[in-house]
Image (tube, helix red, strand yellow):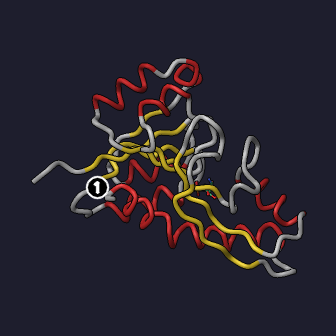
Amino acid sequence: MSPKIRVAIFGSGTGSNAKNLIQHFAHHANVEVSWVLSNKPQALILQHATDAKIPTRIITKEDQANCSTLISELRERKIDWIVLAGYLWKIPAELCAEFPNKIINIHPALLPKYGGKGMYGHFVHEAVNAANEKESGITIHFVNEHYDEGNIIFQAKCSIDENDGPEGIEKKVRALEIAHFPHIVESTILL
Ligand code: GRF
C-alpha cells in the first residue's frame, strides 16, 4: 500500500474549517492531516488538532522573515500539501515555490471581488453588505505569492436577503464552507 498523502493545515482562528477537515480525513484511505500550524499560540485551531492527536507548531515572525527552517521541517515531515483554513499571514514566496499548486486556500467571498490585503473574516462580509450585493459565497483557490490571486478551483454561491446584514451573510458563507471545503480539498489532492 502506498503511503498516505500528507496534509498540513495552517490557520489563525477558531478552526471550524480545520476541525471539519480533520474529521473528514480522520479515517481516509489515502489522505491524512499530519500537522496543524498557527501563527497564534492561543488559537482554538491548535486545540482541535491536539484533541485529534495531530502534532502542532507555532509559526513565528522569524519563520515569516526566513522560512528555511519551516521548509526543512515540512520536508522532514514529508508534507505533500498545505491547506490554509483561515490563515491570516501571507505565505512567503519561498514557501509558495516549495509547494507549487500544492497550497489551497478558502476565501469567504466570490473572488476576484472582496479579496486582497485586509479582506478577511468579518471585514469581507461587512464590505459585501455595504455594497448591497445580492449574492456572496466561497472561493477555494490555489495560493501564489499574491493575496487571493491564485487559480480558482471552486466557487459556491448563496443569495443575500435584505435583512441578512454582515452576520447573516457570514452564517450562509460558513455553511457553504462546511459543506464543500473537505470534498474540494479531497478531489483536488486526489486528481
Ligand atoms: C473562514 O471564513 C474562512 O473562509 C476564512 O477565515 C475563516 C476561518 O474560520 N478564510 P475558521 O477558523 O475556520 O472558523
- From the image, which quarter does the N terminus lie in? bottom left
Spot occupied by residue 60 in the image (x, y as percentages of width and height): 55, 26
Residue at the outermost front position: 151
- The image shows residue 142, relative to residue 191, as above or below, that is above
Q: Residues within 10 Å of mark 1 (few under 14, many from 20)?
A: some
Spot occupied by residue 88 in the image (x, y as percentages of width and height): 63, 41
Spot occupied by residue 104 in the image (x, y as percentages of width and height): 49, 49
Residue at x 63%, y 55% (from the top left corner): 107
- Residue 187 in the figure: left or right of residue 157: left
- The image shows residue 72, relative to residue 80, as above or below, that is above
Question: How many labels, in total?
Answer: 1
Q: Determine the secondary structure under disc 1.
A: strand
Spot occupied by residue 7 in the image (x, y as percentages of width and height): 36, 47
- From the image, which quarter does the C terminus lie in? bottom left
Residue at x 40%, y 26% (from the top left corner): 71
- Give the residue at mark 1: 31
Nearest the camera: 145 or 62? Answer: 145
For ligand 1, tell me if the residue under mark 1 lies within 8 Å: no
Identify the image quadrant of residue 55. top left
Residue at x 73%, y 44% (from the top left corner): 116
Residue at x 67%, y 68% (from the top left corner): 137
Ligand 1 found in image quarter:
bottom right
- The image shows residue 72, relative to residue 169, as above or below, that is above
Name the residue type under label 1: Val
